[in-house]
Each structure stands twice: as C-alpha cells, then as structure tokens.
Amino acid sequence: GDSVTQMEGPVTLSEEAFLTINCTYTATGYPSLFWYVQYPGEGLQLLLKATKADDKGSNKGFEATYRKETTSFHLEKGSVQVSDSAVYFCALSDRIQGAQKLVFGQGTRLTINP
Amino acid sequence: DAGVTQSPTHLIKTRGQHVTLRCSPISGHKSVSWYQQVLGQGPQFIFQYYEKEERGRGNFPDRFSARQFPNYSSELNVNALLLGDSALYLCASSLDGGYNQPQHFGDGTRLSIL
C-alpha cells in the first residue's frame, strides 16, 4: 500500500536557522500531498498542500514542492522561530473502498532554541 | 466559524469497558473521518463517513464502530477495551470526503485504559 517516510527526529535548530524536513512517498497513483503540524496537547493543523506534480504549497513562511520524479515533498522554511516548535507530519491522500484516507509519516519533532 | 469539536477531551476507562467519543464537523462539512494516534506515531485511519454511510474502513477490529447523524456529527464506539486502545482519537471533517480535499482535525480525545 501507499506509504510516507519522514526524516527521523528530533530536529533542534537555533532561531532564524534554515529548516528542511525531508518527506518521500510511495504511491501507485498521483496522490495529493499535505503537511500537518501538531502543537503540544492539540490536534493536527493543516499547514499546506499540493495536488499535482510541480505544485508548490506555501503558508506562514513554509513551502513544499510536489516532486514526482523523486517522489518527494520536503518542507522548508527560510528562518524559523521559537513558535515553530512542534511535530510535523507529512501525509498523502489515498483511496480505500471509496473513502479518502490520509496516510501519515511518523512525524518529525522540531525544537527551536532562542 | 467553529472548527471541528470533539468531546470529551480526556477519558479514563478500564479493560473490558466500552466508550463513546463524539465529534461535530465544521459547518457545511458532510464527511467525517476517525483516526487513532498512538503516542509517538502518526495517525492511523479508522473509518470515513459521508451522508450517514460508512465509505471505508481501515485495519481495525469490529470492536470499533461509528455512526453519523443527520446533522453530520458522529460518534465513535469502542467495545471490550484493551490496554492497546490507549491513544489520542482524532476526528477530521471535509466537505464531501473527496480525494483531493484537505481534512480538518479536531483537538482529539485522549483515551487512557487502565
């Protein structure tokens, strides 16, 4: 079945550093791709999405480009802030029995130090 | 507008009991999905409902069941609770569960089994 692999964490950076969190996927078709963020004690918030190859999703300074040739959707931000500390999940949209399900990676914990 | 709301926020049960979790989708959303998130992992798909019908089911035993009401809210029921059912249960809504639609998550119900 379809799957998502994220870079292992935790990742610790200093404020204003450049961030990359790697995400690769395996899929039989061309799924939509998503990044979600989870702050402590909360549910998942949609950060950005891309629905087809070469699409770039962006939000709050974060960007990710849907790369079909490398089956990747890496998350980047040019200058991180302490408030970006959270767990980040890469996900793809898959079909199961007529339903849409999200398949998630294992998550990458990000800590930003002042 | 209110986001996805879930209740209760926390619940403690003992093995063998049953539990009911509740979810109200974003206004205008007709599809509700349920996910289980075990500590340190990404969420796993349980089921998706649309217009009160189950559209698809993940790899979970029959002890897990759900229903959707005419107002599109949903209940997740788990019978004969096991220690391994301890997790964060997330509800997500989307307009109609379509393949490319993002799913919007609530803050979850944290279920602890003693």
Image: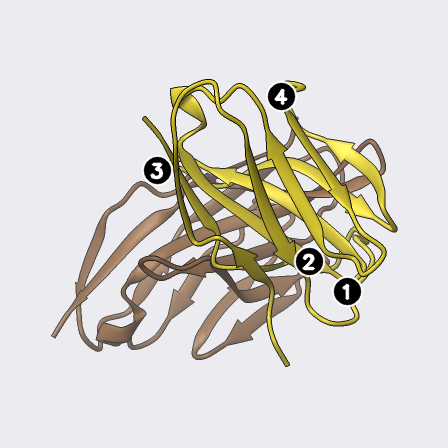
Q: Amino acid at mark 3?
A: Leu
The image position of residue A30, as x and y in percent, is 74, 45
Amino acid type of the residue tagged 4 in the rendering: Arg
Mark 2 sits on what residue?
B93
On the image, the x and y values in percent for residue B83 come to 38, 21
Instruction: Return the mark for residue B29.
Output: 1
Closer to the observer: label 4 or label 2? Answer: 4
Mark 4 vs mark 2, CA separation in Å: 23 Å
SS for callout 1: loop
Q: Is residue A59 left or right of residue B103?
A: left
- Along the polypeptide, which appears first: circle 3 or circle 4? 3
Q: Chain of mark 3?
A: B
Q: Residues within 10 Å of mark 2 (few under 14, many from 20)?
A: many
Q: Earlier in the sequence, mark 3 or mark 1?
A: 1
Which quadrant of the figure has residue B88? top left
Q: Secondary structure at mark 4?
A: loop
Tell me the chain of label 1.
Answer: B
Q: Is residue B77 left or right of residue A8?
A: right
Instruction: Name the residue beneath numbered marker 4.
Output: B63
Q: Respond whether the residues carrying marks 2 and 1 are from the same subunit.
A: yes
Residue linked to disc 3: B39
Q: Are marks 3 and 2 in contact (CB under 8 Å)?
A: no
Chain of the residue displaying label 4: B
